[in-house]
Image (cartoon, grey):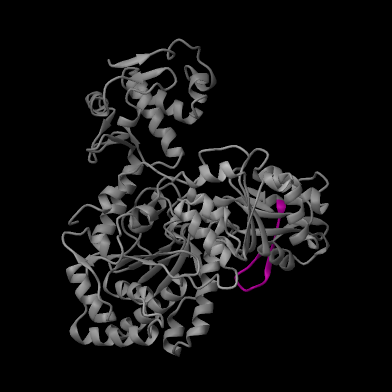
Protein backbone atom coordinates (compact mmCIF):
# COMPACT_ATOMS: atom_id res chain seq x y z
CA UNK A 1 0.00 0.00 0.00
CA UNK A 2 1.19 3.50 -0.82
CA UNK A 3 -0.40 5.19 2.20
CA UNK A 4 1.92 6.74 4.73
CA UNK A 5 0.23 6.51 8.12
CA UNK A 6 1.34 8.48 11.13
CA UNK A 7 -1.66 8.76 13.41
CA UNK A 8 -4.42 6.38 12.37
CA UNK A 9 -4.58 3.31 14.48
CA UNK A 10 -2.33 4.89 17.08
CA UNK A 11 -4.95 7.09 18.70
CA UNK A 12 -7.61 5.65 20.94
CA UNK A 13 -11.16 5.41 19.68
CA UNK A 14 -13.23 8.41 20.65
CA UNK A 15 -16.74 9.69 19.70
CA UNK A 16 -18.75 7.10 17.79
CA UNK A 17 -15.91 4.58 17.87
CA UNK A 18 -13.93 6.65 15.37
CA UNK A 19 -10.14 6.22 15.65
CA UNK A 20 -8.05 9.37 15.90
CA UNK A 21 -11.01 11.69 16.27
CA UNK A 22 -8.99 14.72 17.39
CA UNK A 23 -6.61 14.51 14.44
CA UNK A 24 -9.51 14.52 11.98
CA UNK A 25 -11.69 17.18 13.56
CA UNK A 26 -8.74 19.59 13.62
CA UNK A 27 -8.74 19.46 9.81
CA UNK A 28 -12.44 20.18 9.44
CA UNK A 29 -13.86 16.66 9.33
CA UNK A 30 -17.18 16.01 11.04
CA UNK A 31 -18.23 12.91 12.92
CA UNK A 32 -20.42 12.03 9.92
CA UNK A 33 -17.45 12.26 7.54
CA UNK A 34 -15.23 10.00 9.60
CA UNK A 35 -18.01 7.57 10.51
CA UNK A 36 -18.85 7.15 6.82
CA UNK A 37 -15.17 6.58 6.05
CA UNK A 38 -14.89 4.04 8.86
CA UNK A 39 -17.97 2.18 7.59
CA UNK A 40 -16.64 2.01 4.04
CA UNK A 41 -13.12 1.02 5.11
CA UNK A 42 -14.51 -1.89 7.17
CA UNK A 43 -16.23 -3.21 4.05
CA UNK A 44 -12.87 -3.31 2.28
CA UNK A 45 -10.48 -4.87 4.75
CA UNK A 46 -9.91 -1.75 6.89
CA UNK A 47 -8.05 -0.24 3.95
CA UNK A 48 -6.83 3.19 5.00
CA UNK A 49 -6.67 4.53 1.43
CA UNK A 50 -10.41 3.88 1.26
CA UNK A 51 -10.85 5.57 4.63
CA UNK A 52 -8.98 8.68 3.52
CA UNK A 53 -10.79 8.95 0.17
CA UNK A 54 -14.23 8.46 1.73
CA UNK A 55 -13.59 11.00 4.48
CA UNK A 56 -12.39 13.55 1.94
CA UNK A 57 -15.33 13.19 -0.42
CA UNK A 58 -17.79 13.44 2.47
CA UNK A 59 -16.11 16.57 3.83
CA UNK A 60 -15.82 18.24 0.44
CA UNK A 61 -19.52 17.68 -0.30
CA UNK A 62 -20.40 19.33 3.01
CA UNK A 63 -18.33 22.31 1.91
CA UNK A 64 -20.29 22.72 -1.33
CA UNK A 65 -18.15 20.65 -3.69
CA UNK A 66 -19.74 17.93 -5.81
CA UNK A 67 -16.66 15.70 -5.83
CA UNK A 68 -13.04 15.52 -4.75
CA UNK A 69 -10.16 15.60 -7.21
CA UNK A 70 -7.83 12.88 -5.96
CA UNK A 71 -4.83 14.59 -7.55
CA UNK A 72 -5.39 17.60 -5.29
CA UNK A 73 -4.88 15.48 -2.18
CA UNK A 74 -2.37 12.92 -3.46
CA UNK A 75 0.89 13.46 -1.58
CA UNK A 76 -0.80 15.79 0.91
CA UNK A 77 -0.86 14.91 4.59
CA UNK A 78 -4.39 14.70 6.01
CA UNK A 79 -4.74 13.92 9.71
CA UNK A 80 -1.42 12.10 9.60
CA UNK A 81 -2.25 10.07 6.47
CA UNK A 82 -0.78 10.58 3.00
CA UNK A 83 -1.44 8.77 -0.29
CA UNK A 84 2.02 8.97 -1.79
CA UNK A 85 1.29 8.20 -5.46
CA UNK A 86 -0.80 10.25 -7.91
CA UNK A 87 -4.59 10.46 -8.16
CA UNK A 88 -4.80 7.93 -10.99
CA UNK A 89 -3.05 5.29 -8.88
CA UNK A 90 -5.30 6.10 -5.93
CA UNK A 91 -8.39 5.69 -8.10
CA UNK A 92 -7.09 2.42 -9.52
CA UNK A 93 -6.52 1.17 -5.97
CA UNK A 94 -10.11 2.05 -5.00
CA UNK A 95 -11.46 0.31 -8.12
CA UNK A 96 -9.37 -2.80 -7.50
CA UNK A 97 -10.84 -3.12 -4.01
CA UNK A 98 -14.38 -2.55 -5.28
CA UNK A 99 -14.73 0.59 -3.16
CA UNK A 100 -15.33 2.80 -6.20
CA UNK A 101 -16.71 2.10 -9.63
CA UNK A 102 -18.15 3.65 -12.75
CA UNK A 103 -21.55 5.14 -13.55
CA UNK A 104 -23.22 1.75 -14.07
CA UNK A 105 -21.79 0.05 -11.00
CA UNK A 106 -23.45 -0.19 -7.58
CA UNK A 107 -20.60 1.19 -5.47
CA UNK A 108 -21.19 4.06 -3.04
CA UNK A 109 -18.28 5.94 -4.61
CA UNK A 110 -17.96 6.77 -8.31
CA UNK A 111 -14.81 7.63 -10.28
CA UNK A 112 -14.91 9.52 -13.56
CA UNK A 113 -12.19 9.61 -16.18
CA UNK A 114 -10.48 12.65 -14.64
CA UNK A 115 -9.61 11.15 -11.22
CA UNK A 116 -12.63 12.83 -9.63
CA UNK A 117 -14.33 10.87 -6.86
CA UNK A 118 -18.05 11.31 -6.14
CA UNK A 119 -20.68 10.07 -3.76
CA UNK A 120 -22.96 8.13 -6.09
CA UNK A 121 -26.04 10.28 -5.46
CA UNK A 122 -24.16 13.44 -6.45
CA UNK A 123 -22.79 11.78 -9.58
CA UNK A 124 -26.31 10.75 -10.58
CA UNK A 125 -27.59 14.29 -10.09
CA UNK A 126 -24.71 15.67 -12.15
CA UNK A 127 -25.35 13.25 -15.01
CA UNK A 128 -29.09 13.98 -14.95
CA UNK A 129 -28.54 17.72 -15.21
CA UNK A 130 -25.93 17.37 -17.95
CA UNK A 131 -28.13 15.03 -20.00
CA UNK A 132 -31.14 17.33 -19.71
CA UNK A 133 -29.24 20.49 -20.65
CA UNK A 134 -27.61 18.73 -23.58
CA UNK A 135 -30.87 17.41 -25.01
CA UNK A 136 -33.14 20.40 -24.46
CA UNK A 137 -30.88 23.09 -25.95
CA UNK A 138 -31.46 21.83 -29.49
CA UNK A 139 -32.87 24.37 -31.94
CA UNK A 140 -36.61 23.94 -32.56
CA UNK A 141 -36.81 25.99 -35.75
CA UNK A 142 -40.29 27.43 -36.33
CA UNK A 143 -42.14 26.94 -39.60
CA UNK A 144 -42.07 29.83 -42.08
CA UNK A 145 -45.53 31.18 -41.20
CA UNK A 146 -44.72 30.90 -37.49
CA UNK A 147 -41.50 32.87 -38.00
CA UNK A 148 -43.53 35.81 -39.28
CA UNK A 149 -45.85 35.73 -36.26
CA UNK A 150 -42.94 35.48 -33.82
CA UNK A 151 -41.10 38.34 -35.51
CA UNK A 152 -44.19 40.53 -35.24
CA UNK A 153 -44.60 39.64 -31.57
CA UNK A 154 -40.95 40.32 -30.76
CA UNK A 155 -41.11 43.71 -32.48
CA UNK A 156 -44.29 44.54 -30.57
CA UNK A 157 -42.92 43.69 -27.11
CA UNK A 158 -39.37 44.86 -27.82
CA UNK A 159 -39.59 47.96 -30.06
CA UNK A 160 -35.84 48.50 -29.77
CA UNK A 161 -33.45 50.44 -27.52
CA UNK A 162 -32.81 54.10 -28.24
CA UNK A 163 -29.06 53.85 -27.65
CA UNK A 164 -28.35 51.78 -30.74
CA UNK A 165 -26.99 48.84 -28.72
CA UNK A 166 -28.22 45.29 -29.48
CA UNK A 167 -31.39 44.58 -27.51
CA UNK A 168 -30.30 41.60 -25.41
CA UNK A 169 -33.73 41.36 -23.81
CA UNK A 170 -35.19 40.79 -27.27
CA UNK A 171 -32.43 38.31 -28.01
CA UNK A 172 -33.16 36.39 -24.79
CA UNK A 173 -36.83 36.25 -25.73
CA UNK A 174 -36.05 34.90 -29.19
CA UNK A 175 -33.83 32.19 -27.68
CA UNK A 176 -36.66 31.16 -25.35
CA UNK A 177 -39.02 30.84 -28.31
CA UNK A 178 -36.82 28.43 -30.28
CA UNK A 179 -35.33 26.18 -27.54
CA UNK A 180 -36.99 24.18 -24.78
CA UNK A 181 -34.36 25.22 -22.27
CA UNK A 182 -32.69 28.59 -21.83
CA UNK A 183 -30.78 30.62 -19.25
CA UNK A 184 -31.11 34.37 -18.73
CA UNK A 185 -28.36 35.85 -16.57
CA UNK A 186 -28.11 39.45 -15.48
CA UNK A 187 -27.32 41.66 -12.54
CA UNK A 188 -29.87 43.68 -10.56
CA UNK A 189 -32.01 46.01 -12.62
CA UNK A 190 -31.18 44.45 -15.99
CA UNK A 191 -34.83 43.60 -16.61
CA UNK A 192 -34.83 39.83 -16.21
CA UNK A 193 -38.38 39.64 -14.84
CA UNK A 194 -39.80 42.10 -17.37
CA UNK A 195 -38.12 40.12 -20.14
CA UNK A 196 -39.53 36.84 -18.87
CA UNK A 197 -43.03 38.32 -18.57
CA UNK A 198 -42.84 39.34 -22.22
CA UNK A 199 -41.53 35.87 -23.10
CA UNK A 200 -44.50 34.30 -21.34
CA UNK A 201 -46.87 36.56 -23.27
CA UNK A 202 -45.22 35.52 -26.55
CA UNK A 203 -45.37 31.83 -25.58
CA UNK A 204 -49.06 32.16 -24.69
CA UNK A 205 -49.74 33.70 -28.09
CA UNK A 206 -47.69 30.98 -29.79
CA UNK A 207 -49.50 28.22 -27.88
CA UNK A 208 -52.91 29.63 -28.77
CA UNK A 209 -51.94 29.65 -32.45
CA UNK A 210 -50.87 26.01 -32.30
CA UNK A 211 -53.45 24.58 -29.94
CA UNK A 212 -56.93 25.34 -28.71
CA UNK A 213 -56.14 26.65 -25.25
CA UNK A 214 -53.66 28.45 -23.07
CA UNK A 215 -50.48 26.82 -21.76
CA UNK A 216 -50.09 25.91 -18.11
CA UNK A 217 -47.37 28.13 -16.65
CA UNK A 218 -45.62 27.67 -13.31
CA UNK A 219 -43.34 30.14 -11.52
CA UNK A 220 -40.87 28.93 -8.91
CA UNK A 221 -37.88 30.01 -6.84
CA UNK A 222 -35.65 28.33 -4.25
CA UNK A 223 -37.14 30.13 -1.21
CA UNK A 224 -40.52 31.47 -0.16
CA UNK A 225 -39.19 35.03 -0.09
CA UNK A 226 -37.77 34.72 -3.60
CA UNK A 227 -41.01 33.18 -4.86
CA UNK A 228 -43.04 36.05 -3.39
CA UNK A 229 -40.70 38.61 -4.98
CA UNK A 230 -40.94 36.83 -8.33
CA UNK A 231 -44.72 36.94 -8.27
CA UNK A 232 -44.72 40.57 -7.20
CA UNK A 233 -42.32 41.49 -10.01
CA UNK A 234 -44.30 39.58 -12.65
CA UNK A 235 -47.55 41.20 -11.48
CA UNK A 236 -45.92 44.62 -11.73
CA UNK A 237 -44.65 43.88 -15.23
CA UNK A 238 -48.10 42.68 -16.31
CA UNK A 239 -49.64 45.96 -15.11
CA UNK A 240 -47.07 48.00 -17.04
CA UNK A 241 -47.30 46.05 -20.28
CA UNK A 242 -51.04 46.32 -20.87
CA UNK A 243 -51.44 42.75 -22.11
CA UNK A 244 -54.52 41.45 -23.87
CA UNK A 245 -57.24 39.81 -21.78
CA UNK A 246 -56.47 36.40 -23.29
CA UNK A 247 -52.77 36.63 -22.46
CA UNK A 248 -53.41 38.12 -19.03
CA UNK A 249 -55.81 35.30 -18.14
CA UNK A 250 -53.19 32.68 -18.99
CA UNK A 251 -50.44 34.10 -16.78
CA UNK A 252 -49.97 32.57 -13.31
CA UNK A 253 -51.23 34.32 -10.20
CA UNK A 254 -48.83 32.71 -7.75
CA UNK A 255 -45.30 31.38 -7.46
CA UNK A 256 -44.13 28.42 -5.40
CA UNK A 257 -40.87 27.22 -3.96
CA UNK A 258 -39.17 24.47 -5.94
CA UNK A 259 -39.48 22.21 -2.89
CA UNK A 260 -43.21 22.83 -2.83
CA UNK A 261 -43.50 22.00 -6.54
CA UNK A 262 -41.64 18.74 -6.06
CA UNK A 263 -43.61 18.07 -2.88
CA UNK A 264 -46.79 18.15 -4.97
CA UNK A 265 -45.46 15.00 -6.64
CA UNK A 266 -44.82 13.39 -3.28
CA UNK A 267 -41.05 13.59 -3.72
CA UNK A 268 -39.21 14.04 -0.49
CA UNK A 269 -36.24 16.34 -0.36
CA UNK A 270 -33.78 13.43 -0.13
CA UNK A 271 -35.38 11.14 -2.73
CA UNK A 272 -33.34 10.61 -5.87
CA UNK A 273 -35.46 9.92 -8.92
CA UNK A 274 -38.81 8.33 -9.56
CA UNK A 275 -40.21 7.67 -12.99
CA UNK A 276 -43.79 8.33 -13.96
CA UNK A 277 -45.48 11.46 -12.69
CA UNK A 278 -44.25 14.81 -13.97
CA UNK A 279 -45.00 18.41 -13.12
CA UNK A 280 -48.28 19.47 -14.76
CA UNK A 281 -47.01 22.51 -16.64
CA UNK A 282 -46.08 23.46 -20.18
CA UNK A 283 -43.72 26.25 -19.12
CA UNK A 284 -41.68 26.51 -15.92
CA UNK A 285 -39.81 29.67 -14.94
CA UNK A 286 -37.28 29.42 -12.10
CA UNK A 287 -35.90 32.64 -10.63
CA UNK A 288 -32.77 33.06 -8.47
CA UNK A 289 -31.22 30.03 -10.17
CA UNK A 290 -27.83 30.73 -8.59
CA UNK A 291 -29.35 29.51 -5.30
CA UNK A 292 -30.35 26.13 -6.75
CA UNK A 293 -27.93 23.39 -5.71
CA UNK A 294 -27.08 20.37 -7.83
CA UNK A 295 -29.35 17.84 -6.05
CA UNK A 296 -32.34 20.19 -6.29
CA UNK A 297 -31.69 20.92 -9.95
CA UNK A 298 -31.30 17.21 -10.60
CA UNK A 299 -34.67 16.44 -9.03
CA UNK A 300 -36.26 19.34 -10.88
CA UNK A 301 -35.16 18.35 -14.39
CA UNK A 302 -36.17 14.74 -13.76
CA UNK A 303 -39.65 16.00 -12.86
CA UNK A 304 -40.25 17.74 -16.19
CA UNK A 305 -42.27 16.27 -19.03
CA UNK A 306 -40.42 16.10 -22.38
CA UNK A 307 -42.62 18.90 -23.75
CA UNK A 308 -42.09 21.32 -20.84
CA UNK A 309 -40.09 24.48 -21.47
CA UNK A 310 -37.68 25.47 -18.70
CA UNK A 311 -36.47 29.06 -18.31
CA UNK A 312 -33.82 29.73 -15.66
CA UNK A 313 -33.19 33.29 -14.45
CA UNK A 314 -30.46 34.48 -12.17
CA UNK A 315 -27.20 36.31 -11.71
CA UNK A 316 -24.15 34.21 -12.56
CA UNK A 317 -21.95 36.48 -10.40
CA UNK A 318 -23.87 35.91 -7.17
CA UNK A 319 -22.92 33.45 -4.47
CA UNK A 320 -23.31 29.81 -5.36
CA UNK A 321 -25.88 27.67 -3.57
CA UNK A 322 -25.42 26.81 0.09
CA UNK A 323 -25.47 23.10 -0.70
CA UNK A 324 -23.32 21.25 -3.22
CA UNK A 325 -22.65 22.62 -6.67
CA UNK A 326 -22.57 25.91 -8.55
CA UNK A 327 -25.06 25.08 -11.29
CA UNK A 328 -25.78 28.61 -12.50
CA UNK A 329 -22.08 29.42 -12.72
CA UNK A 330 -21.41 26.19 -14.59
CA UNK A 331 -24.27 26.87 -17.02
CA UNK A 332 -22.91 30.33 -17.89
CA UNK A 333 -19.21 29.51 -17.69
CA UNK A 334 -18.40 29.01 -21.36
CA UNK A 335 -20.65 31.70 -22.85
CA UNK A 336 -18.53 34.29 -24.64
CA UNK A 337 -20.40 37.42 -25.72
CA UNK A 338 -23.29 36.73 -28.10
CA UNK A 339 -21.59 34.00 -30.16
CA UNK A 340 -23.95 31.19 -31.20
CA UNK A 341 -23.96 28.34 -33.70
CA UNK A 342 -24.52 29.13 -37.37
CA UNK A 343 -28.01 27.60 -37.39
CA UNK A 344 -29.07 29.42 -34.23
CA UNK A 345 -27.55 32.68 -35.47
CA UNK A 346 -29.48 32.51 -38.74
CA UNK A 347 -32.82 31.99 -36.97
CA UNK A 348 -32.21 34.56 -34.23
CA UNK A 349 -31.09 37.22 -36.69
CA UNK A 350 -34.18 36.66 -38.82
CA UNK A 351 -36.41 36.93 -35.74
CA UNK A 352 -34.77 39.96 -34.14
CA UNK A 353 -32.87 41.78 -36.86
CA UNK A 354 -29.77 41.59 -34.64
CA UNK A 355 -26.64 40.34 -36.46
CA UNK A 356 -24.85 37.81 -34.27
CA UNK A 357 -21.32 36.38 -34.35
CA UNK A 358 -21.30 32.65 -35.02
CA UNK A 359 -18.84 29.87 -34.33
CA UNK A 360 -18.14 26.29 -35.39
CA UNK A 361 -18.36 23.18 -33.24
CA UNK A 362 -19.82 25.08 -30.28
CA UNK A 363 -21.32 23.26 -27.28
CA UNK A 364 -25.14 23.22 -27.55
CA UNK A 365 -25.38 25.26 -24.36
CA UNK A 366 -23.81 28.26 -26.13
CA UNK A 367 -27.12 28.67 -27.98
CA UNK A 368 -29.19 28.67 -24.78
CA UNK A 369 -27.49 31.30 -22.57
CA UNK A 370 -28.11 35.05 -22.82
CA UNK A 371 -26.55 37.66 -20.54
CA UNK A 372 -28.30 40.98 -19.91
CA UNK A 373 -25.73 43.69 -19.29
CA UNK A 374 -27.58 47.03 -19.13
CA UNK A 375 -28.92 48.01 -15.69
CA UNK A 376 -31.92 50.33 -15.40
CA UNK A 377 -32.09 50.42 -11.60
CA UNK A 378 -29.52 52.67 -9.98
CA UNK A 379 -30.05 55.97 -11.79
CA UNK A 380 -30.71 57.94 -8.58
CA UNK A 381 -28.13 56.05 -6.52
CA UNK A 382 -25.31 55.23 -8.94
CA UNK A 383 -22.93 54.30 -6.14
CA UNK A 384 -24.56 50.88 -5.78
CA UNK A 385 -24.03 50.05 -9.44
CA UNK A 386 -20.45 51.33 -9.34
CA UNK A 387 -19.73 49.30 -6.20
CA UNK A 388 -21.26 46.16 -7.70
CA UNK A 389 -19.11 46.57 -10.80
CA UNK A 390 -15.93 47.12 -8.80
CA UNK A 391 -16.65 44.12 -6.59
CA UNK A 392 -17.37 41.95 -9.62
CA UNK A 393 -14.03 42.93 -11.14
CA UNK A 394 -12.24 42.34 -7.84
CA UNK A 395 -11.07 45.97 -7.79
CA UNK A 396 -10.73 46.96 -4.12
CA UNK A 397 -9.05 50.26 -4.99
CA UNK A 398 -11.94 51.34 -7.22
CA UNK A 399 -14.45 50.28 -4.58
CA UNK A 400 -12.71 52.37 -1.93
CA UNK A 401 -12.72 55.39 -4.24
CA UNK A 402 -16.47 55.50 -4.91
CA UNK A 403 -18.07 58.75 -3.78
CA UNK A 404 -21.36 58.56 -5.69
CA UNK A 405 -24.67 58.56 -3.88
CA UNK A 406 -25.84 55.17 -2.65
CA UNK A 407 -22.53 53.72 -1.42
CA UNK A 408 -20.45 54.20 1.70
CA UNK A 409 -17.34 52.34 2.84
CA UNK A 410 -16.50 52.54 6.55
CA UNK A 411 -13.99 50.81 8.79
CA UNK A 412 -11.59 51.19 11.69
CA UNK A 413 -9.96 54.19 10.01
CA UNK A 414 -13.11 56.25 10.71
CA UNK A 415 -12.17 56.36 14.39
CA UNK A 416 -15.28 54.42 15.43
CA UNK A 417 -15.50 50.84 16.55
CA UNK A 418 -17.68 48.48 14.52
CA UNK A 419 -20.12 48.37 17.43
CA UNK A 420 -20.43 52.16 17.66
CA UNK A 421 -20.88 52.46 13.91
CA UNK A 422 -23.53 49.72 13.81
CA UNK A 423 -25.47 51.23 16.70
CA UNK A 424 -25.59 54.55 14.85
CA UNK A 425 -26.88 52.80 11.70
CA UNK A 426 -29.53 50.91 13.67
CA UNK A 427 -30.78 54.08 15.36
CA UNK A 428 -30.86 55.90 12.03
CA UNK A 429 -32.99 53.28 10.32
CA UNK A 430 -34.93 51.46 13.07
CA UNK A 431 -35.41 54.15 15.73
CA UNK A 432 -39.20 53.75 15.81
CA UNK A 433 -39.33 49.96 15.46
CA UNK A 434 -39.96 49.26 19.14
CA UNK A 435 -43.07 51.47 19.14
CA UNK A 436 -44.73 49.58 16.28
CA UNK A 437 -47.45 47.04 17.03
CA UNK A 438 -48.80 46.14 13.58
CA UNK A 439 -46.78 43.20 12.16
CA UNK A 440 -47.24 44.55 8.63
CA UNK A 441 -45.57 47.82 9.62
CA UNK A 442 -42.77 45.90 11.32
CA UNK A 443 -42.13 43.80 8.22
CA UNK A 444 -42.10 46.97 6.12
CA UNK A 445 -39.54 48.53 8.48
CA UNK A 446 -37.34 45.43 8.19
CA UNK A 447 -37.61 45.46 4.41
CA UNK A 448 -36.27 49.01 4.49
CA UNK A 449 -33.17 48.08 6.49
CA UNK A 450 -31.18 44.90 6.96
CA UNK A 451 -27.73 44.06 8.29
CA UNK A 452 -25.90 41.39 6.29
CA UNK A 453 -23.01 39.40 7.75
CA UNK A 454 -20.41 37.21 6.13
CA UNK A 455 -20.23 34.80 9.08
CA UNK A 456 -22.58 33.41 11.70
CA UNK A 457 -20.27 33.41 14.71
CA UNK A 458 -17.74 35.74 16.26
CA UNK A 459 -17.54 39.47 16.88
CA UNK A 460 -19.02 40.31 13.44
CA UNK A 461 -21.32 37.29 13.24
CA UNK A 462 -25.09 37.14 12.89
CA UNK A 463 -25.72 36.01 16.47
CA UNK A 464 -23.78 38.80 18.16
CA UNK A 465 -25.11 41.53 15.86
CA UNK A 466 -28.70 40.43 16.38
CA UNK A 467 -28.13 40.79 20.13
CA UNK A 468 -26.56 44.22 19.54
CA UNK A 469 -29.68 45.36 17.65
CA UNK A 470 -31.97 44.01 20.37
CA UNK A 471 -29.99 45.86 23.02
CA UNK A 472 -29.91 49.04 20.95
CA UNK A 473 -33.69 48.97 20.47
CA UNK A 474 -34.43 47.88 24.04
CA UNK A 475 -36.08 44.63 22.97
CA UNK A 476 -36.13 41.19 24.50
CA UNK A 477 -34.55 41.83 27.87
CA UNK A 478 -32.41 38.74 27.33
CA UNK A 479 -35.40 36.53 26.47
CA UNK A 480 -35.44 34.45 23.29
CA UNK A 481 -39.09 35.20 22.48
CA UNK A 482 -40.59 38.67 22.77
CA UNK A 483 -43.12 40.84 20.90
CA UNK A 484 -41.43 42.38 17.88
CA UNK A 485 -38.88 39.59 17.41
CA UNK A 486 -38.43 39.08 13.65
CA UNK A 487 -37.76 35.48 12.70
CA UNK A 488 -36.78 33.63 9.55
CA UNK A 489 -37.81 30.03 8.94
CA UNK A 490 -34.76 27.85 8.27
CA UNK A 491 -36.42 24.55 7.34
CA UNK A 492 -39.49 23.63 5.32
CA UNK A 493 -42.71 22.59 7.06
CA UNK A 494 -45.26 21.48 4.49
CA UNK A 495 -47.96 20.92 7.11
CA UNK A 496 -47.82 24.55 8.23
CA UNK A 497 -47.09 25.83 4.75
CA UNK A 498 -43.85 27.46 5.90
CA UNK A 499 -40.68 27.35 3.86
CA UNK A 500 -37.02 28.16 4.25
CA UNK A 501 -36.63 31.94 4.01
CA UNK A 502 -40.16 32.90 5.12
CA UNK A 503 -40.06 35.85 7.53
CA UNK A 504 -42.54 36.71 10.27
CA UNK A 505 -42.98 38.97 13.30
CA UNK A 506 -43.62 37.80 16.86
CA UNK A 507 -46.73 39.34 18.43
CA UNK A 508 -48.77 38.81 21.58
CA UNK A 509 -52.09 37.26 20.63
CA UNK A 510 -54.72 36.11 23.12
CA UNK A 511 -52.13 36.33 25.88
CA UNK A 512 -49.59 34.12 24.09
CA UNK A 513 -46.77 34.68 21.66
CA UNK A 514 -47.43 33.87 18.03
CA UNK A 515 -45.64 34.71 14.81
CA UNK A 516 -47.44 36.63 12.07
CA UNK A 517 -46.59 35.62 8.50
CA UNK A 518 -47.92 37.28 5.33
CA UNK A 519 -50.43 35.08 3.51
CA UNK A 520 -51.15 34.80 -0.19
CA UNK A 521 -54.21 37.08 0.02
CA UNK A 522 -52.26 40.00 1.44
CA UNK A 523 -53.36 39.38 5.01
CA UNK A 524 -51.54 37.81 7.96
CA UNK A 525 -51.73 34.35 9.45
CA UNK A 526 -50.66 33.61 13.00
CA UNK A 527 -48.83 30.50 14.20
CA UNK A 528 -48.03 29.81 17.85
CA UNK A 529 -44.31 30.01 18.47
CA UNK A 530 -44.25 26.46 19.90
CA UNK A 531 -45.52 25.00 16.60
CA UNK A 532 -42.88 26.57 14.41
CA UNK A 533 -40.06 24.68 12.69
CA UNK A 534 -36.55 25.97 13.28
CA UNK A 535 -36.32 29.76 13.13
CA UNK A 536 -33.70 32.40 13.88
CA UNK A 537 -33.75 36.10 14.71
CA UNK A 538 -33.33 38.17 11.58
CA UNK A 539 -32.46 41.80 12.29
CA UNK A 540 -29.16 40.58 10.86
CA UNK A 541 -28.70 37.63 8.51
CA UNK A 542 -25.96 36.03 6.47
CA UNK A 543 -25.40 37.17 2.92
CA UNK A 544 -26.23 33.63 1.83
CA UNK A 545 -29.64 33.86 3.49
CA UNK A 546 -30.29 37.25 1.88
CA UNK A 547 -30.24 35.87 -1.66
CA UNK A 548 -33.63 36.33 -3.29
CA UNK A 549 -34.33 39.40 -1.15
CA UNK A 550 -33.89 43.14 -1.57
CA UNK A 551 -33.85 45.91 1.03
CA UNK A 552 -33.96 49.67 0.69
CA UNK A 553 -30.89 50.17 2.88
CA UNK A 554 -28.25 47.50 3.49
CA UNK A 555 -25.33 47.34 5.89
CA UNK A 556 -22.73 44.71 4.95
CA UNK A 557 -20.37 43.74 7.77
CA UNK A 558 -17.15 41.87 7.02
CA UNK A 559 -15.28 40.20 9.92
CA UNK A 560 -12.14 41.56 11.51
CA UNK A 561 -10.00 38.64 10.30
CA UNK A 562 -9.78 36.82 6.98
CA UNK A 563 -11.78 33.64 6.39
CA UNK A 564 -12.33 31.31 3.40
CA UNK A 565 -15.99 32.37 3.20
CA UNK A 566 -14.93 35.91 2.24
CA UNK A 567 -15.09 35.95 -1.55
CA UNK A 568 -15.72 38.33 -4.41
CA UNK A 569 -19.14 36.74 -4.92
CA UNK A 570 -20.11 37.31 -1.29
CA UNK A 571 -19.25 41.03 -1.42
CA UNK A 572 -21.03 41.44 -4.77
CA UNK A 573 -24.13 39.64 -3.52
CA UNK A 574 -24.28 41.73 -0.35
CA UNK A 575 -23.95 45.00 -2.25
CA UNK A 576 -26.61 44.09 -4.79
CA UNK A 577 -29.25 43.37 -2.12
CA UNK A 578 -29.64 47.16 -1.74
CA UNK A 579 -32.16 49.22 -3.69
CA UNK A 580 -31.12 52.73 -2.58
CA UNK A 581 -28.11 52.60 -0.25
CA UNK A 582 -25.44 50.16 0.88
CA UNK A 583 -22.82 50.76 3.56
CA UNK A 584 -19.91 48.33 3.95
CA UNK A 585 -17.87 47.96 7.14
CA UNK A 586 -14.47 46.41 6.54
CA UNK A 587 -10.79 46.90 7.18
CA UNK A 588 -9.07 47.65 3.84
CA UNK A 589 -6.89 44.54 3.94
CA UNK A 590 -9.88 42.27 4.61
CA UNK A 591 -11.85 43.76 1.72
CA UNK A 592 -8.89 43.37 -0.61
CA UNK A 593 -8.44 39.71 0.33
CA UNK A 594 -12.16 39.04 -0.12
CA UNK A 595 -12.27 40.60 -3.58
CA UNK A 596 -9.18 38.65 -4.59
CA UNK A 597 -10.75 35.29 -3.77
CA UNK A 598 -13.17 33.58 -6.19
CA UNK A 599 -15.59 30.81 -5.28
CA UNK A 600 -14.36 27.57 -6.82
CA UNK A 601 -16.22 24.31 -6.39
CA UNK A 602 -15.03 20.93 -7.56
CA UNK A 603 -17.44 19.43 -10.07
CA UNK A 604 -17.52 17.69 -13.40
CA UNK A 605 -20.68 19.47 -14.57
CA UNK A 606 -18.95 22.41 -16.23
CA UNK A 607 -16.84 20.08 -18.35
CA UNK A 608 -19.86 17.99 -19.35
CA UNK A 609 -21.93 21.04 -20.28
CA UNK A 610 -19.27 22.79 -22.34
CA UNK A 611 -17.85 19.89 -24.32
CA UNK A 612 -17.17 21.03 -27.87
CA UNK A 613 -19.75 19.96 -30.38
CA UNK A 614 -22.07 18.67 -27.64
Image quadrant assignment for residue 341: bottom left
Give the percent coordinates (x, y) of residue 255: 50, 68
From this viewpoint, is residue 493 visible? no
Q: Is residue 146 left or right of residue 68?
A: left
Give the percent coordinates (x, y) of residue 458: 65, 38
For the residue pair 81 and 600, the one nearer the viewer reads as 600
* Range covered by the magenta-colored residues: 518-529
For the residue pair 359 and 218, the one nearer the viewer reads as 359
Q: Residue at x 46, y 43 (%)?
A: 597
Give the percent coordinates (x, y) of residue 484: 77, 57
For the residue pair 365 and 582, the one nearer the viewer reads as 582
Give the percent coordinates (x, y) of residue 501: 58, 56
Asked if residue 460 is among those painted magenta in the image, a careful observer would answer no
Asked if residue 527 is among those painted magenta in the image, a careful observer would answer yes
Vertical order, 159 against 325 (above or below): below
Q: Residue at x 34, y 14 (%)?
A: 4
Q: Is residue 141 left or right of residue 36?
A: left
Amino acid sequence: MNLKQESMGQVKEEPGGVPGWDAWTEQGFSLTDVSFASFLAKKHGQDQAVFLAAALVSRECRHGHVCVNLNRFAGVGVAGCTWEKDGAAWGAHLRALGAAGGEDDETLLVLDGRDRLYLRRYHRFQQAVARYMGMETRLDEPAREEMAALTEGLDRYFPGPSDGEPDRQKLAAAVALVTRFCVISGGPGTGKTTTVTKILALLVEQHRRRFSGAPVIALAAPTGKAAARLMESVAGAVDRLGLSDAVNAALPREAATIHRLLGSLGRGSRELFRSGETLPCDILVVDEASMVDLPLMGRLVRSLAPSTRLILMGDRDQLASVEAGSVMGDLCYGKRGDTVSEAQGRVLTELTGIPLPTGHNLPPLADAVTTLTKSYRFGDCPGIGEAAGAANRGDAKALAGITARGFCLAGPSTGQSAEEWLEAEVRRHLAGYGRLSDPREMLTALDRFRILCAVRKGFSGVGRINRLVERCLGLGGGELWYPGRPVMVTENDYTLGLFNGDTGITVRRDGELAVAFPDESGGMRYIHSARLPRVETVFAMTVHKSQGSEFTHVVLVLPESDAPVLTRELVYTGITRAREEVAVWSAPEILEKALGRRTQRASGLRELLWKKGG
